[in-house]
Image (cartoon, rainbow, N blue to C red):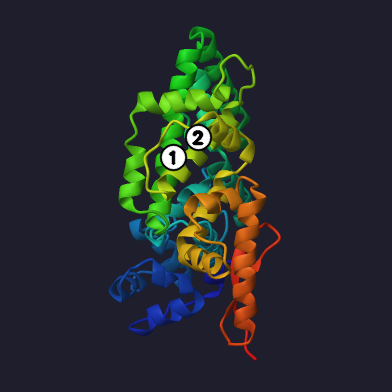
Protein backbone atom coordinates (compact mmCIF):
# COMPACT_ATOMS: atom_id res chain seq x y z
CA UNK A 1 0.00 0.00 0.00
CA UNK A 2 1.18 3.50 -0.78
CA UNK A 3 2.14 5.08 2.60
CA UNK A 4 0.28 8.21 1.58
CA UNK A 5 -3.01 6.36 1.97
CA UNK A 6 -2.43 6.09 5.73
CA UNK A 7 -1.65 9.76 6.42
CA UNK A 8 -4.67 11.70 7.69
CA UNK A 9 -5.41 14.49 8.39
CA UNK A 10 -2.76 16.67 6.74
CA UNK A 11 -0.12 18.38 8.78
CA UNK A 12 -0.05 22.16 8.73
CA UNK A 13 2.45 24.95 8.90
CA UNK A 14 6.23 24.55 8.85
CA UNK A 15 6.06 20.94 10.01
CA UNK A 16 4.21 19.69 6.91
CA UNK A 17 7.21 19.34 4.60
CA UNK A 18 9.29 17.79 7.36
CA UNK A 19 6.56 15.24 8.12
CA UNK A 20 6.17 14.32 4.47
CA UNK A 21 9.93 14.04 3.89
CA UNK A 22 10.15 11.63 6.82
CA UNK A 23 7.66 9.37 5.07
CA UNK A 24 8.81 10.17 1.54
CA UNK A 25 12.56 10.98 1.43
CA UNK A 26 12.29 11.30 -2.36
CA UNK A 27 10.35 14.57 -1.93
CA UNK A 28 13.66 16.39 -1.54
CA UNK A 29 14.60 15.54 -5.09
CA UNK A 30 11.45 17.12 -6.57
CA UNK A 31 12.56 20.64 -5.68
CA UNK A 32 9.28 22.17 -4.55
CA UNK A 33 9.54 24.79 -1.77
CA UNK A 34 7.89 24.46 1.65
CA UNK A 35 5.49 27.29 0.71
CA UNK A 36 3.95 25.08 -2.01
CA UNK A 37 3.13 22.39 0.53
CA UNK A 38 1.73 24.92 3.00
CA UNK A 39 -0.54 26.42 0.34
CA UNK A 40 -1.75 23.03 -0.90
CA UNK A 41 -2.34 21.66 2.59
CA UNK A 42 -4.84 24.47 3.23
CA UNK A 43 -7.17 23.04 0.57
CA UNK A 44 -6.46 19.32 1.03
CA UNK A 45 -8.37 16.87 3.17
CA UNK A 46 -5.41 14.57 3.84
CA UNK A 47 -1.71 14.13 3.33
CA UNK A 48 -2.51 11.57 0.63
CA UNK A 49 -4.32 14.32 -1.26
CA UNK A 50 -1.26 16.56 -0.92
CA UNK A 51 0.90 13.81 -2.44
CA UNK A 52 -1.65 13.27 -5.21
CA UNK A 53 -1.49 16.98 -6.10
CA UNK A 54 2.29 16.85 -5.91
CA UNK A 55 2.30 14.06 -8.50
CA UNK A 56 0.45 16.37 -10.86
CA UNK A 57 3.09 19.10 -10.83
CA UNK A 58 5.50 19.67 -13.70
CA UNK A 59 8.41 19.40 -11.27
CA UNK A 60 7.36 15.89 -10.21
CA UNK A 61 6.71 14.78 -13.78
CA UNK A 62 10.15 16.03 -14.83
CA UNK A 63 11.87 14.34 -11.88
CA UNK A 64 10.14 10.98 -12.41
CA UNK A 65 9.64 11.12 -16.17
CA UNK A 66 10.08 7.37 -16.59
CA UNK A 67 7.90 6.27 -13.69
CA UNK A 68 4.56 5.87 -15.49
CA UNK A 69 3.73 3.36 -18.19
CA UNK A 70 1.73 4.41 -21.23
CA UNK A 71 -1.47 3.25 -19.52
CA UNK A 72 -0.76 5.53 -16.54
CA UNK A 73 0.21 2.78 -14.10
CA UNK A 74 3.38 3.11 -12.03
CA UNK A 75 6.35 0.87 -12.83
CA UNK A 76 7.47 1.15 -9.18
CA UNK A 77 7.24 3.66 -6.36
CA UNK A 78 9.40 6.75 -6.20
CA UNK A 79 11.90 5.34 -3.69
CA UNK A 80 12.45 2.28 -5.89
CA UNK A 81 12.83 4.57 -8.90
CA UNK A 82 15.61 6.55 -7.22
CA UNK A 83 17.35 3.36 -6.05
CA UNK A 84 17.27 2.02 -9.62
CA UNK A 85 18.70 5.30 -10.90
CA UNK A 86 21.57 4.85 -8.44
CA UNK A 87 22.14 1.33 -9.77
CA UNK A 88 22.22 2.63 -13.35
CA UNK A 89 24.64 5.38 -12.34
CA UNK A 90 26.96 2.95 -10.56
CA UNK A 91 27.07 0.61 -13.58
CA UNK A 92 27.69 3.39 -16.06
CA UNK A 93 30.52 4.73 -13.91
CA UNK A 94 32.11 1.26 -13.91
CA UNK A 95 32.08 1.30 -17.72
CA UNK A 96 33.74 4.68 -17.96
CA UNK A 97 30.77 7.00 -18.54
CA UNK A 98 31.68 10.47 -17.27
CA UNK A 99 29.83 11.88 -14.27
CA UNK A 100 28.52 14.89 -16.20
CA UNK A 101 26.51 12.51 -18.39
CA UNK A 102 24.70 11.09 -15.35
CA UNK A 103 23.77 14.19 -13.35
CA UNK A 104 20.31 14.72 -14.82
CA UNK A 105 17.29 12.48 -14.14
CA UNK A 106 16.46 12.74 -17.84
CA UNK A 107 19.63 10.75 -18.60
CA UNK A 108 17.96 7.59 -17.27
CA UNK A 109 14.42 7.96 -18.58
CA UNK A 110 15.09 5.79 -21.63
CA UNK A 111 16.15 2.87 -19.44
CA UNK A 112 12.92 3.05 -17.45
CA UNK A 113 10.67 3.45 -20.49
CA UNK A 114 12.35 0.45 -22.12
CA UNK A 115 11.91 -1.53 -18.89
CA UNK A 116 15.63 -2.29 -18.72
CA UNK A 117 16.57 -3.37 -15.20
CA UNK A 118 20.17 -3.01 -13.92
CA UNK A 119 21.01 -6.66 -14.68
CA UNK A 120 19.96 -6.26 -18.30
CA UNK A 121 21.83 -2.96 -18.51
CA UNK A 122 25.00 -4.68 -17.30
CA UNK A 123 24.60 -7.35 -19.98
CA UNK A 124 24.21 -4.67 -22.64
CA UNK A 125 27.17 -2.70 -21.33
CA UNK A 126 29.28 -5.87 -21.41
CA UNK A 127 28.30 -6.42 -25.04
CA UNK A 128 28.96 -2.79 -25.96
CA UNK A 129 32.34 -2.88 -24.22
CA UNK A 130 33.31 -6.03 -26.12
CA UNK A 131 32.18 -4.50 -29.42
CA UNK A 132 34.05 -1.30 -28.66
CA UNK A 133 37.33 -3.03 -27.80
CA UNK A 134 37.15 -5.85 -30.33
CA UNK A 135 35.18 -4.40 -33.19
CA UNK A 136 37.89 -2.55 -35.10
CA UNK A 137 38.67 -5.53 -37.31
CA UNK A 138 35.00 -5.78 -38.24
CA UNK A 139 34.70 -2.04 -38.91
CA UNK A 140 37.74 -2.24 -41.19
CA UNK A 141 36.26 -5.21 -43.05
CA UNK A 142 33.00 -3.35 -43.73
CA UNK A 143 34.96 -0.42 -45.16
CA UNK A 144 37.53 -2.35 -47.18
CA UNK A 145 35.08 -4.79 -48.78
CA UNK A 146 31.98 -2.61 -49.09
CA UNK A 147 33.05 1.00 -48.58
CA UNK A 148 30.77 1.21 -45.50
CA UNK A 149 31.69 3.34 -42.48
CA UNK A 150 30.26 1.36 -39.57
CA UNK A 151 30.33 2.75 -36.02
CA UNK A 152 30.53 1.01 -32.65
CA UNK A 153 26.85 1.88 -32.15
CA UNK A 154 25.96 0.24 -35.47
CA UNK A 155 27.75 -2.97 -34.48
CA UNK A 156 26.19 -2.94 -31.03
CA UNK A 157 22.69 -2.53 -32.48
CA UNK A 158 23.36 -5.43 -34.86
CA UNK A 159 24.51 -7.54 -31.92
CA UNK A 160 21.46 -7.03 -29.69
CA UNK A 161 18.72 -6.41 -32.29
CA UNK A 162 18.05 -9.07 -34.98
CA UNK A 163 16.26 -6.51 -37.16
CA UNK A 164 19.27 -4.18 -37.05
CA UNK A 165 21.55 -7.10 -37.87
CA UNK A 166 19.44 -7.99 -40.90
CA UNK A 167 19.45 -4.37 -42.13
CA UNK A 168 23.22 -4.17 -41.80
CA UNK A 169 23.74 -7.45 -43.64
CA UNK A 170 21.37 -6.41 -46.42
CA UNK A 171 23.17 -3.08 -46.85
CA UNK A 172 26.52 -4.86 -46.96
CA UNK A 173 25.33 -7.36 -49.58
CA UNK A 174 23.84 -4.59 -51.70
CA UNK A 175 27.06 -2.53 -51.57
CA UNK A 176 29.18 -5.54 -52.53
CA UNK A 177 26.86 -6.47 -55.38
CA UNK A 178 26.78 -2.92 -56.77
CA UNK A 179 30.52 -2.23 -56.48
CA UNK A 180 32.70 -5.00 -57.92
CA UNK A 181 35.92 -4.94 -55.87
CA UNK A 182 39.25 -4.80 -57.71
CA UNK A 183 42.63 -5.10 -56.02
CA UNK A 184 43.51 -1.41 -56.39
CA UNK A 185 40.35 -0.38 -54.55
CA UNK A 186 40.86 -3.07 -51.91
CA UNK A 187 44.48 -2.16 -51.11
CA UNK A 188 43.69 1.57 -51.15
CA UNK A 189 40.87 1.14 -48.65
CA UNK A 190 43.04 -1.16 -46.56
CA UNK A 191 45.71 1.53 -46.47
CA UNK A 192 43.20 4.20 -45.44
CA UNK A 193 41.89 1.95 -42.66
CA UNK A 194 45.42 1.07 -41.60
CA UNK A 195 46.51 4.70 -41.37
CA UNK A 196 43.40 5.59 -39.34
CA UNK A 197 44.11 2.72 -36.97
CA UNK A 198 47.77 3.73 -36.64
CA UNK A 199 46.82 7.35 -35.95
CA UNK A 200 44.54 6.28 -33.09
CA UNK A 201 47.09 3.90 -31.61
CA UNK A 202 50.03 6.28 -31.78
CA UNK A 203 48.03 9.18 -30.37
CA UNK A 204 47.07 7.00 -27.40
CA UNK A 205 50.71 6.03 -26.84
CA UNK A 206 51.74 9.68 -27.04
CA UNK A 207 49.21 10.56 -24.32
CA UNK A 208 50.70 7.80 -22.16
CA UNK A 209 54.15 9.32 -22.62
CA UNK A 210 55.52 6.31 -24.48
CA UNK A 211 56.21 8.22 -27.70
CA UNK A 212 57.15 11.79 -28.54
CA UNK A 213 54.85 14.01 -30.55
CA UNK A 214 57.41 14.45 -33.31
CA UNK A 215 57.84 10.68 -33.66
CA UNK A 216 54.10 10.19 -33.86
CA UNK A 217 53.67 12.93 -36.46
CA UNK A 218 56.46 11.51 -38.62
CA UNK A 219 54.41 8.34 -39.03
CA UNK A 220 50.92 9.85 -39.15
CA UNK A 221 51.99 12.27 -41.91
CA UNK A 222 53.23 9.48 -44.17
CA UNK A 223 52.21 10.02 -47.79
CA UNK A 224 49.17 7.78 -48.46
CA UNK A 225 50.62 6.59 -51.77
CA UNK A 226 53.84 5.51 -50.06
CA UNK A 227 51.85 3.88 -47.26
CA UNK A 228 49.97 1.92 -49.91
CA UNK A 229 53.30 0.62 -51.26
CA UNK A 230 54.18 -0.61 -47.77
CA UNK A 231 50.75 -2.20 -47.37
CA UNK A 232 51.10 -3.90 -50.74
CA UNK A 233 54.56 -5.24 -49.84
CA UNK A 234 53.28 -6.61 -46.55
CA UNK A 235 50.27 -8.18 -48.24
CA UNK A 236 52.36 -10.05 -50.84
CA UNK A 237 55.37 -10.60 -48.61
CA UNK A 238 57.57 -8.62 -50.99
CA UNK A 239 56.87 -11.04 -53.87
CA UNK A 240 53.57 -10.59 -55.78
CA UNK A 241 54.12 -13.91 -57.52
CA UNK A 242 54.46 -15.97 -54.35
CA UNK A 243 50.74 -16.38 -53.72
CA UNK A 244 51.47 -16.15 -49.98
CA UNK A 245 49.15 -13.33 -49.00
CA UNK A 246 47.75 -12.19 -45.65
CA UNK A 247 44.10 -11.94 -44.75
CA UNK A 248 42.79 -8.47 -43.91
CA UNK A 249 43.18 -8.80 -40.15
CA UNK A 250 46.75 -10.05 -40.47
CA UNK A 251 47.53 -7.22 -42.88
CA UNK A 252 46.09 -4.56 -40.54
CA UNK A 253 48.06 -5.90 -37.59
CA UNK A 254 51.29 -6.15 -39.58
CA UNK A 255 50.97 -2.59 -40.84
CA UNK A 256 50.20 -1.31 -37.36
CA UNK A 257 53.16 -3.18 -35.93
CA UNK A 258 55.48 -1.70 -38.56
CA UNK A 259 54.18 1.79 -37.73
CA UNK A 260 54.62 1.25 -33.99
CA UNK A 261 58.22 0.29 -34.58
CA UNK A 262 58.83 3.30 -36.79
CA UNK A 263 57.38 5.69 -34.21
CA UNK A 264 59.24 4.05 -31.33
CA UNK A 265 62.56 4.58 -33.13
CA UNK A 266 61.59 8.21 -33.93
CA UNK A 267 61.67 7.48 -37.66
CA UNK A 268 59.15 7.77 -40.44
CA UNK A 269 57.59 4.77 -42.09
CA UNK A 270 60.06 3.17 -44.47
CA UNK A 271 59.61 0.48 -47.09
CA UNK A 272 60.96 -2.65 -45.37
CA UNK A 273 63.24 -5.12 -47.10
CA UNK A 274 62.11 -8.70 -47.69
CA UNK A 275 63.75 -10.01 -44.53
CA UNK A 276 62.05 -7.38 -42.38
CA UNK A 277 58.72 -8.03 -44.12
CA UNK A 278 59.05 -11.72 -43.32
CA UNK A 279 59.80 -10.93 -39.69
CA UNK A 280 56.85 -8.58 -39.35
CA UNK A 281 54.47 -11.01 -41.04
CA UNK A 282 55.54 -13.94 -38.91
CA UNK A 283 55.84 -12.12 -35.59
CA UNK A 284 52.18 -12.58 -34.75
CA UNK A 285 52.30 -9.59 -32.45
CA UNK A 286 48.89 -8.29 -31.49
CA UNK A 287 48.12 -4.60 -31.23
CA UNK A 288 47.71 -4.83 -27.46
CA UNK A 289 50.96 -6.76 -27.00
CA UNK A 290 52.88 -4.32 -29.17
CA UNK A 291 51.50 -1.31 -27.30
CA UNK A 292 52.32 -2.88 -23.96
CA UNK A 293 55.86 -3.74 -25.02
CA UNK A 294 56.61 -0.29 -26.40
CA UNK A 295 55.21 1.39 -23.28
CA UNK A 296 57.40 -0.95 -21.25
CA UNK A 297 60.46 -0.08 -23.33
CA UNK A 298 59.75 3.64 -23.07
CA UNK A 299 59.62 3.39 -19.28
CA UNK A 300 62.66 1.12 -18.88
CA UNK A 301 64.94 1.67 -21.90
CA UNK A 302 67.74 3.16 -19.79
CA UNK A 303 67.47 0.30 -17.34
CA UNK A 304 67.63 -2.29 -20.12
CA UNK A 305 70.54 -0.60 -21.89
CA UNK A 306 72.51 -0.13 -18.67
CA UNK A 307 71.88 -3.69 -17.47
CA UNK A 308 73.01 -5.24 -20.74
CA UNK A 309 76.08 -2.99 -20.95
CA UNK A 310 77.14 -3.68 -17.35
CA UNK A 311 76.88 -7.43 -17.95
CA UNK A 312 79.31 -7.13 -20.86
CA UNK A 313 76.65 -7.36 -23.57
CA UNK A 314 77.45 -4.02 -25.18
CA UNK A 315 74.88 -1.52 -26.43
CA UNK A 316 71.20 -2.50 -26.32
CA UNK A 317 68.96 -0.47 -28.64
CA UNK A 318 65.30 -0.20 -29.55
CA UNK A 319 65.92 -2.55 -32.46
CA UNK A 320 67.52 -5.08 -30.12
CA UNK A 321 64.50 -4.86 -27.80
CA UNK A 322 62.13 -5.51 -30.71
CA UNK A 323 64.13 -8.55 -31.75
CA UNK A 324 64.19 -9.89 -28.19
CA UNK A 325 60.52 -9.16 -27.46
CA UNK A 326 58.76 -9.78 -30.77
CA UNK A 327 60.87 -11.48 -33.36
CA UNK A 328 62.17 -14.47 -31.43
CA UNK A 329 65.83 -13.54 -31.70
CA UNK A 330 67.50 -15.86 -29.17
CA UNK A 331 70.78 -13.93 -29.02
CA UNK A 332 69.11 -10.60 -28.19
CA UNK A 333 66.76 -12.22 -25.69
CA UNK A 334 69.74 -13.90 -24.01
CA UNK A 335 71.62 -10.58 -23.77
CA UNK A 336 68.65 -8.90 -22.12
CA UNK A 337 67.94 -11.82 -19.79
CA UNK A 338 71.59 -12.02 -18.72
CA UNK A 339 71.78 -8.28 -18.05
CA UNK A 340 68.59 -8.17 -16.01
CA UNK A 341 69.54 -11.33 -14.17
CA UNK A 342 72.84 -9.80 -13.13
CA UNK A 343 71.08 -6.63 -11.96
CA UNK A 344 68.75 -8.77 -9.85
CA UNK A 345 71.67 -10.56 -8.21
CA UNK A 346 73.26 -7.23 -7.36
CA UNK A 347 70.01 -6.03 -5.80
CA UNK A 348 69.65 -8.97 -3.40
CA UNK A 349 72.52 -7.83 -1.24
CA UNK A 350 72.01 -4.10 -1.41
CA UNK A 351 68.31 -3.45 -1.02
CA UNK A 352 67.99 -2.35 -4.66
CA UNK A 353 64.99 -3.20 -6.82
CA UNK A 354 64.75 -6.65 -8.35
CA UNK A 355 63.87 -7.48 -11.94
CA UNK A 356 61.98 -10.60 -13.00
CA UNK A 357 60.52 -12.01 -16.20
CA UNK A 358 56.88 -13.10 -16.17
CA UNK A 359 55.36 -16.07 -17.95
CA UNK A 360 54.38 -13.90 -20.92
CA UNK A 361 57.96 -12.81 -21.48
CA UNK A 362 57.59 -9.32 -20.00
CA UNK A 363 60.09 -7.88 -17.52
CA UNK A 364 59.04 -6.17 -14.32
CA UNK A 365 60.41 -4.67 -11.13
CA UNK A 366 59.29 -6.90 -8.29
CA UNK A 367 60.06 -4.48 -5.45
CA UNK A 368 62.79 -3.89 -2.94
CA UNK A 369 64.78 -6.95 -1.95
CA UNK A 370 66.11 -6.24 1.53
CA UNK A 371 68.66 -8.21 3.52
In this view, the residue in front, 175 or 253, is 253
Q: Relative to the observer, which residue lies in front, 310 or 184? A: 310
Estimate the x, y position of residue 255 in percent, counting from the top left. Answer: 50, 34
User: In the image, what residue occupies the spot 41% across and 62% down?
Assistant: 99
Q: Is residue 346 above or below residue 98?
A: below
Whether residue 44 sits left or right of residue 214 in the image: it is: right
Q: Can residue 73 be spotted in the picture?
A: no
Whole-percent x and y of residue 337? 64, 63
Viewport quadrant of the N terminus = bottom right
Q: Seen from this angle, which residue lies furthest right?
A: 359
* Closer-to-camera residue (17/121): 121
Q: Residue at x 54, y 68 (%)?
A: 307
- Residue 307 visible? The answer is yes
Task: Identify the residue shown where x is 53% and y is 13%.
Answer: 176
Q: Position of residue 368 (x, y in %)?
A: 59, 83
The residue where tag 2 is placed is 255
Among the two numbered marks 1 and 2 on one chain, the one whose residue lies closer to the N terminus: 1
Residue 5 drawn above or below residue 89: below
Whether tag 1 and tag 2 are in contact, CB under 8 A, the answer is yes
- Name the quadrant of the C terminus: bottom right
Of helix, strand and loop, which one carries label 1?
A: helix
User: Which mark is drawn over residue 100?
Assistant: none
Q: Residue 217 at what x, y percent from top left?
A: 32, 43
Q: Which numbered disc, 1 or 2, marks the residue closer to the eye?
A: 2
Could you say whether the residue bearing mark 2 is in a helix, strand or loop? helix
The residue shown at (53%, 19%) is 145
Q: Which residue is mark 1?
A: 198
Q: Quadrant of residue 38?
A: bottom left
Amino acid sequence: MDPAQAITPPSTGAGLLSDLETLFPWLKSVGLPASWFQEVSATSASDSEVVAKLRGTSQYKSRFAGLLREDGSMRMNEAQYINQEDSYRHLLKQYGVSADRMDNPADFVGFFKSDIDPNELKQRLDIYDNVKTGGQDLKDAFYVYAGMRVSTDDLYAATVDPAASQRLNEEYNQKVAMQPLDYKTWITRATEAGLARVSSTLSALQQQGALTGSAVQSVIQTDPNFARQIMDALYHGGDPTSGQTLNLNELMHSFEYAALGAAATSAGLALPDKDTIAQIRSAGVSRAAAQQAYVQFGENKNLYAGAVDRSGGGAFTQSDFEKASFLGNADEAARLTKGLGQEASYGQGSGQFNISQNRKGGYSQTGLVNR
